[in-house]
Image (cartoon, grey):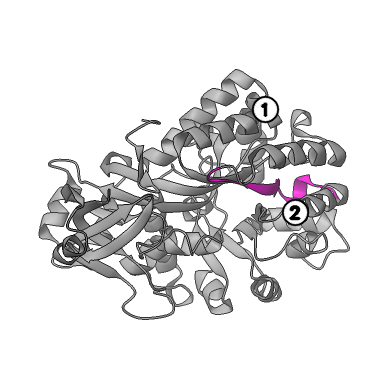
Amino acid sequence: MSTIVRARVAHTPRNPFATDGALEVFEDGGLAFADGRILGCGRFGDVQAGHPEAEILDARDTILLPGFVDCHVHYPQIGVIGSMGLELLEWLRSRCLPEEARLADSGYAASAAERFVRGLAANGTTTALVFGSHFPAAQEALFAAAAASGLRVASGLVVADRRLLPSLHVSAAEAFEASVGLIERWHGRGLIRYAVTPRFSVSCSDEMLDACGELLRSADGLLLTTHLNETVREVEVVASLFPGARDYLDTYERDGLVGERSVFAHDVHVSDHELGRLAAADAAVAHCPSSNAFLGSGLFPLRRHVDAGIRVGLGTDVGAGTGLSLLKEGLAAHDVQMLLGGEGVRLSPAHVLWLATAGGALALGLADEVGDLSVGKSADFVLVRPPAQSTLAAVLECSESAEQALGAVFTLAREESIAEARVAGNVVWPGRVG
């Protein structure tokens, strides 16, 4: 039997960076779905006429949006959110890595995985590319929690063999063997995909990056995710460790890690030459504006990426970020571009919604499956309800247009405003992980 959710509906079935009129809004809208797939989206009366037998769920006090897509988020790092006053490498050494080392305890790892997955769903994130753990048992825990939750998750064992804590180091051979086992058990199982995950070139030798390249070629549909050009100091360290490399990107290119299934986090301090090669390889970038600001890493050059034709989505990053909300991340992206002035992109609510949904889906190679509410796509969506007597509720009452209302949602709505989230029509929040 089909279902129609009646709500104010908004999505971006077209790319606002490429065309006008990308935002589609239905003030009294309906979304029809059955068997996990969208059957219709439009004016409620029209959708109901097309599906007269459907069960009606009246959610007119909510705004229905596509499920949010997080392109870069670290699962072990919830506990270190809010570690102020540190730059990246210092923050890693003193706050982040000791917390990640705690996941060697399988009980702690299982608790962290449940907490993390619950947090994604509670914030309306239905799809995520997750930077995993250095420990195979902890990575198993994440995959198990993600599978039980019903979320759409790609992740993988994080590998490194130098310049971290000794407990986080493994040999290239050990990393390869453990990753193969995880790929065999989890890649393609339900909504789970595997992502080959070298931490970054600072912590990976040539041998480790070579093993990652071999892994990436070992099975169809694997993703590659890592960090790139996050801070000036990091770029300098990479140059010292790889004296024969042209630049940071080259440390990944020579092992075949840059391609259409590659997603690089941050890319704040990117050269024009690197941008051209990223575009030619059809690689994607995860923009993490809150994290970039929190660690003082820099202001992301979105205009240069868009002009180069590079796919860009949003990432919360988490430990160095300010939480799991992509609504908050959309606001941060807007603010960063305003600070850049003429060098930035003046983002409208349509641009921000695209980055948090369809743009992220495109970056993760899922544009045919999720990201907007087009007929035939998976019924992944979120219902945003302003808390009673909240500032958001007051602003929405005063909003004179759909764009104003959407801007208010990204500016003011957070976890407490997520009334429900669904993946393939199934409730994931509040529900089994709630």
Q: Image point 20% across, 63% down: which residue? A: 47
On screen, residue 47 above or below 432: below
Where does the magenta region start and end? Answer: 190-205
Residue 108: x and y, percent? Answer: 58, 21
Residue 187: x and y, percent? Answer: 64, 44
Q: Residues within 10 Å of mark 1 (few under 14, many from 20)?
A: many
Task: Give the mark nearer the N terminus: 2 vs 1.
Answer: 1
Q: Residues within 10 Å of mark 2 (few under 14, many from 20)?
A: many
Residue 137's disc is 1
Secondary structure state at the residue bearing disc 1: helix
Residue 162 in sight: no
Q: Image point 33% across, 41% down: which residue? A: 415
Kind of residue at badge 1:
Ala
- Would you identify the image quadrant in which residue 137 lies? top right
Circles 2 and 1, Cβ within 8 Å, touching? The answer is no
On screen, residue 225 above or below 150: below
Q: Image point 19% across, 53% down: which residue? A: 53
Residue 345: x and y, percent? Answer: 43, 73
Instruction: State left or right for residue 9 relative to residue 371.
Output: left
The residue wearing badge 2 is: 216
Check residue 200 for magenta coloring.
yes
